[in-house]
Image (cartoon, helix red, strand yellow):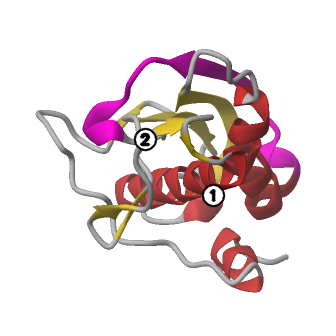
């Protein structure tokens, strides 16, 4: 059985460094057998990979890639909290916020950037409940923000 890190490597991806918070919060909190992430922005090497509104300067494809980067950052935050991604038994809930122009209605397709990555990395345990919400603006003018709730196994 391959580990989540091995599946990421097969996708040409790796767990990044945990993104530094942009305000007064921590990237993730463990409560019992659950880990809640803070909203993760599409940061790579300390910089947003895109800024602006989806449908007005940011394409749906760029936003999909942003959602994927947010998911990678959530994975990093979870790993920093629990040490081993194999401890995750279920991605329970994913909430994706998409800074959108008023006419853009493709938030679910943007959110698939995160959802499909979780499925690819965690298999059946990556299938989750989800909300995809259009908003007026996100921190730092990010086009996408993702928060995640995961369940851990009893051995973790």
Circle 1 or circle 2, nearest the eye: 2
Q: Position of residue 7 (x, y in %)?
A: 75, 75
Q: Secondary structure at mark 2?
A: loop
Q: Position of residue 62 (x, y in %)?
A: 62, 55
Q: Residue 65's spot in the image, x, y percent?
A: 63, 58
Q: Residue at x 81, y 52 (%)?
A: 119
- First to last magenta residue range: 124-141
Disc tally is 2
Q: Give the answer, above or below, for where 46 lies relative to 105.
A: below
Q: Based on the picture, tell me whether residue 135 belongs to the magenta stretch.
A: yes
Q: Is residue 51 left or right of residue 27?
A: right
Binning the other alpha carbons within 10 Å of mark 1 as few (below 14), some (14 to 19) or many (20 upward) gives: many
Residue 52 is marked as 2
Q: Residue at x 74, y 21 (%)?
A: 105
- Pinpoint residue 49: horizontal percent, then vertical percent: 43, 62
Quadrant of residue 100 within the rendered picture:
top right
| Observer-nearest of 98 and 118 | 98
- 1 and 2 marks in contact (CB < 8 Å): no
Q: Is residue 51 left or right of residue 69?
A: left
Quarter of the figure with the N terminus: bottom right
Q: Which residue is mark 1?
A: 65
Position of 54 compared to 113: left or right?
left
In the orientation shown, which residue stands out farthest toward the front? 56
């Amino acid at each position: 059985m391959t580990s989540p890190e091995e599946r990421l490597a097969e996708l040409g991806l790796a767990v990044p460094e945990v993104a530094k918070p942009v305000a007064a919060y921590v990237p993730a909190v463990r409560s019992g057998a659950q880990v809640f992430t803070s909203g993760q922005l599409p940061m790579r090497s300390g910089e947003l990979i895109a800024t602006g509104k989806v449908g007005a300067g940011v394409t749906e494809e760029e936003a999909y890639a942003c959602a994927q980067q947010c998911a990678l950052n959530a994975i990093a935050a979870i790993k920093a909290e629990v040490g081993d991604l194999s401890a995750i038994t279920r991605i329970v809930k994913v909430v994706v916020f998409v800074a959108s122009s008023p006419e853009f209605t493709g938030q679910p397709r943007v959110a698939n950037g995160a959802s499909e990555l979780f499925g690819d990395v965690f298999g059946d345990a990556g299938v989750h409940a989800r909300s995809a919400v259009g908003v007026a603006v996100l921190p730092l003018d990010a086009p996408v923000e993702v928060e995640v709730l995961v369940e851990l196994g009893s051995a973790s």
